[in-house]
Amino acid sequence: MGVLIKLLVLHLCCIYGINGGSYKVDNSVGYGRTFDGIGAISGGGATSKLLINYPTEQRSQILDYLFKPNFGASLQIFKVEIGGDIQSTDGTEASHMHNSWDENYNRGYEWWMMKEAKMRNPDIKLYGLPWGFPGFLKDAYDRPWGNIQSTADYVVKWVNGARVYHNLTMDYIGIWNESPYNITYIKTLRKSLDNAGFGKTMIIASDQNGWDIAGDATKDAELNNAIFGFGSHYPGTNSTPEAASLNKPLWASEDWSCVDPLVGPGCLARTLNQNYVNGYMTSTIIWNIISSYYYGLPWYNSGIMTASEPWSGHYIVPQNIWVTAHTTQFTSIGWKYLKHGYGVGKLNGGGSYVVLISPDEQDLTIIIETLSHDSSICTRPPLAPYNVVAGQTATFELAGILKQRFTSLNTWYSRIGYYKFPSVSFKNRGPLTIQDGSLSVQLGKDEVWTLSTVKSGFKGSFPSVPGSKRFPLPYIEDFEGYKVGEEPFNLAQQVGSFEVDQINNVKFMKQVVLETPVHWFYCLIGTYNTSLNVIGDYTWQDIRADVAVKLDGENTTDSVYLSVRTTACGCQADIESGLFLFFFPKEQRYLLSSDLLRKNILVSGKVPTVTHDWDVIKLQAKGDHVWGAVNNDMLFNISIPVSISHGWVAVGTYPFGTAYFDDLHINPV
Ligand SMILES: *[C@@H]1O[C@H](CO)[C@@H](O)[C@H](O)[C@H]1NC(C)=O
Ligand SMILES: *[C@@H]1O[C@H](CO)[C@@H](O)[C@H](O)[C@H]1NC(C)=O
Ligand SMILES: *[C@@H]1O[C@H](CO)[C@@H](O)[C@H](O)[C@H]1NC(C)=O
Ligand SMILES: *[C@@H]1O[C@H](CO)[C@@H](O)[C@H](O)[C@H]1NC(C)=O
Ligand SMILES: *[C@@H]1O[C@H](CO)[C@@H](O)[C@H](O)[C@H]1NC(C)=O
């Protein structure tokens, strides 16, 4: 009987919100750690590929949602990939040094995006990190530690290129994404940055999972001094006492990665608060900043925003933007968290709160989240079960100078609907009065609240967004509209690096990687010597593509290919996944395979006519038949394996080495 009554009371309390708690907000005991900002990542890899090609009006709107202060996500840190000519998840970002004899600081789109970020928010911090490195830096173990000074020089050149060519100052630099670090390298990088005048560019280490680097730093004073802060990936809101004991900033230097637009906001809200509450982490950096890569690529939709249709201008502003705004629009880098138990902690009924104070102590922000377990499961790591009650009253008791100073707070509210309820995003609920230092909030489940003296909170918007459209056909690309060195917009390089070149007033696209780069540790696709560049629509079925190809000059490849119905992409591009017509001009032969690595050869033979100038490859898939031709000589017309049903058009080479591509035509059939 007693148990039953207890259960009944428990039940009533939780439905009717009798449950509650009182929480001290007090800076007289000192402060916690300094807030370093909320950021997001472009890269790892090629995640912003399609953005630069958007119509300028929508492109500017998207960038406003991401970077403009008091408008949208209002990001405080922007982390970018230092392109390494390697596949780093959704594509390859070009290196500033394809080879030891080459340097170019205008490749790709990260420079452009950093400038757009700075233009909107001059205070945004910039952070660069390599996922891989060009082949000339490779040692016998496929690592970049063969000549550590050369690798440090390579990174310092990028930092210097940012300053010299783009007037960008890099605030932070990393080691090697989610790959083994080398202590000698970290020390060498610090010295090399200092010697080149970049003493203010700080090293974050090591951008791996876990906090092993802190263990090494406790044993090595020089290493400890070289590192500004420890950055861990997907920490699940936890750090270690050892990492915390060194009094360095602890960061979740990559986190989130949610593909599900309904789970994403909940994971984000819980993580942004609890990375500090549980793990003392003062920065959370979200992968990725914008899903601007083709549908069909890995982790599609795992940006805090989605914009993958430059041809239509269509984009999506998910609730992630507004969950981020709950923190970023009411804090600045340099604000202080209060101490645990004095403004930072868990709520009695489940959820968490953090209080941050401006350096001049004139502004105060409280951020509260009550995300339940099922509405906030992140991609990784697993989340242990916990309870959040349906209703609770949280009473914040301001003490000392805070009690004297603050009489009212502006209130912003969101509710994460998940699959169950309609969502509310970043609604201004007006001012809340503080009476005698005390204020109470009725908290439901799956809510995010910001209570702040900051008055500039704003939910930005634009009148309309163009509708979604499919990739337009027919498609023709002759590369004449580009500058030499640019990366063609709609060709999403997966392996190898492709850029526009020119000979005798004719522009074309050239594959430029000559030797196997240092791959990102977890991604072996680049080690197979077969470059890959996809374009179009993942759902294309009946399609014809033509492309002119040429091998010319030094360091050429042996074969070039054209592919239709390919789903080969990302780090798993080696599976059976398309129709690949390889053409070997020197040997005057061809082969058609159903995989990038030519393990499943469907047909092969002689090519009757080879011009050794521009040769034209044609490939058509319609229904269950595929035919191919070189220079109008029909080579085969055979049935297609049933598993090869749809996909992009692609071009590439085997092995690495230069090849030219021009006049790419794609037609529906
Ligand atoms: C770090 O690089 C140096 C120089 O190449 C090498 O001797 C050492 O074995 C490397 N250490 C690790 C842990 O990779
Ligand atoms: C370079 O950027 C700084 C701010 O970081 C600005 O003050 C300066 O005017 C810029 N210089 C040029 C040449 O644009
Ligand atoms: C890649 O190609 C180079 C040069 O053609 C060759 O030396 C190397 O063995 C190849 N590697 C693989 C994995 O095929
Ligand atoms: C070809 O490669 C060699 C090194 O193997 C290099 O010295 C030469 O400059 C390269 N030529 C071109 C045109 O890239
Ligand atoms: C290829 O073969 C199919 C089936 O025999 C036939 O319908 C089609 O016309 C052929 N295409 C060409 C271009 O010869």
Image (cartoon, grey):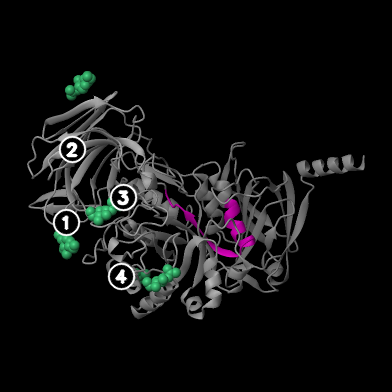
Q: Residues within 10 Å of mark 4 (few under 14, many from 20)?
A: some
Q: Which mark is residue 555?
A: 1
Q: Is residue 120 visible?
A: no
Mark 1 and ligand 4: say if the CB distance to the nearest ligand atom is below 8 Å. yes
- Left/right placement of residue 168 relative to residue 367 reads left
Q: Reading the chain from its start, which is encountered first: label 3 or label 1?
A: 3
**What's the residue type where badge 2 is placed?**
Tyr
Marks 2 and 4 sit apart, C-alpha to C-alpha, by: 42 Å
- Left/right placement of residue 13 relative to residue 88 reads right
Q: Which mark is residue 528?
A: 3
**Image height of 578 relative to 461, above or below:** above
* Quadrant where the C terminus is found in the figure: top left
Identify the residue at image location x=33%, y=74%: 149
Can you identify the residue that label 2 sits on? 590
**What's the residue type where badge 1 is placed?**
Asn
Q: Reading the chain from its start, which is encountered first: label 1 or label 2?
A: 1
Can you identify the residue that label 4 sits on? 157
Marks 3 and 1 sit apart, C-alpha to C-alpha, by: 18 Å
Query: Does the magenta portion include 424?
Result: no
